[in-house]
DNA sequence: CGGAATCCCATACGATACTG
DNA sequence: CAGTATCGTATGGGATTCCG
């Protein structure tokens, strides 16, 4: 049977909040990428993502930071410390739930 | 260790294809809704989704149909057959993978 | 009621150029 | 290399109206 009145249905997922972050074009890619590779720098992320423009990548990374899914880290290197990106614990939790979905999408 | 060269990283999820469908603002909601309630008519979907505009809802439904995730069905009713929407087998598969994610998003 | 048509706006995204 | 600044475009999405 199909409910027909207004309050018969409970919306399982409000579009506000995390959805607008996760819904961003590259967000899922980035979270999965960091979940797979750990700490990654700006350049490799950009090159890996089919050449996303730096402006867009920065914007998405900032949105992910604000959502506390990704954090910016400073790692020591040969000639001075460099910046990189990694998942937060929260981001790792998301990646975990995202994995079956991403695999399924890949398999189409 | 973090890879630094171009081909060291494999993008786990190209943004093309299903992602632009699933990334739509209401797509996940609709799939979850149909997965939960079965066959639902246009009106209840719209009312349930915080009053999404009919144009937007139609657009999203059409996109989901084109992606073969949702199908339009005709069900017999008291005064003539009426139209409604339901998941395809493919859509049910997506809903299944979506469920842990949606639950996690809800729990925030 | 279930849409289609139209209008309008916000913004996401890309391209490019530039800087520390 | 890691961004920032600017600009232009495409389009997603809301509001409204109208129709069978």
Image: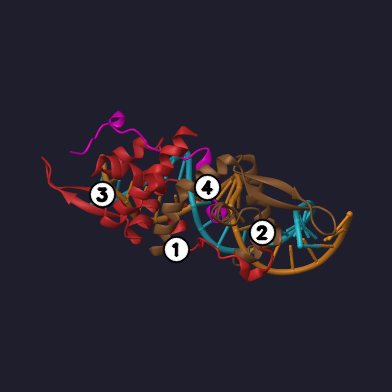
Chain colours: A brown, B red, C orange, D cyan
Q: CA distance from mark 2 to mark 3?
A: 44 Å
Q: Nearer the viewer, mark 2 or mark 1?
A: 2
Residue A26 covered by magenta stretch: yes
Lower position in the chain sequence, tag 1 or tag 3: 1
Quarter holding residue B89:
bottom left
Q: Position of residue B32 (x, y in %)?
A: 35, 44
Provide the residue designation for mark 3.
Answer: B86
Q: Residues within 10 Å of mark 2 (few under 14, many from 20)?
A: some
Provide the residue designation for mark 1.
Answer: B17
Provide the residue designation for mark 4.
Answer: A22
Residue at horizontal 35%, vertical 35%? Answer: B48
Provide the residue designation for mark 2.
Answer: B2
Confirm whether circles 3 and 4 share one chain: no
Are circles 2 and 1 on residues that touch, CB within 8 Å? Answer: no
Q: CA distance from mark 2 to mark 1?
A: 29 Å
Q: Position of residue A59 (x, y in %)?
A: 66, 51
Q: Residues within 10 Å of mark 1 (few under 14, many from 20)?
A: few
Q: Nearer the viewer, mark 3 or mark 4?
A: 4
Q: Nearer the viewer, mark 2 or mark 3?
A: 2
Q: CA distance from mark 3 to mark 4?
A: 25 Å
Q: CA distance from mark 4 to mark 2?
A: 24 Å
Q: Residues in magenta?
A: A1-29
Confirm whether circles 1 and 4 share one chain: no
């Amino acid at each position: 049977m199909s409910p027909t009145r207004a309050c018969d249905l409970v919306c399982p997922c409000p579009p506000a909040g995390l959805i607008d972050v996760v819904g961003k074009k590259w967000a899922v890619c980035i979270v999965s990428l960091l979940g797979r590779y750990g700490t990654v720098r700006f350049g490799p992320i950009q090159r890996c993502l089919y050449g996303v423009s730096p402006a867009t990548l920065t914007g998405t990374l900032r949105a992910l930071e604000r959502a506390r899914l990704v954090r910016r880290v400073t790692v020591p290197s040969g000639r001075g410390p460099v910046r990189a990106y990694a998942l937060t614990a929260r981001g790792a939790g998301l990646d975990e739930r995202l994995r079956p979905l991403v695999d399924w999408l890949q398999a189409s």
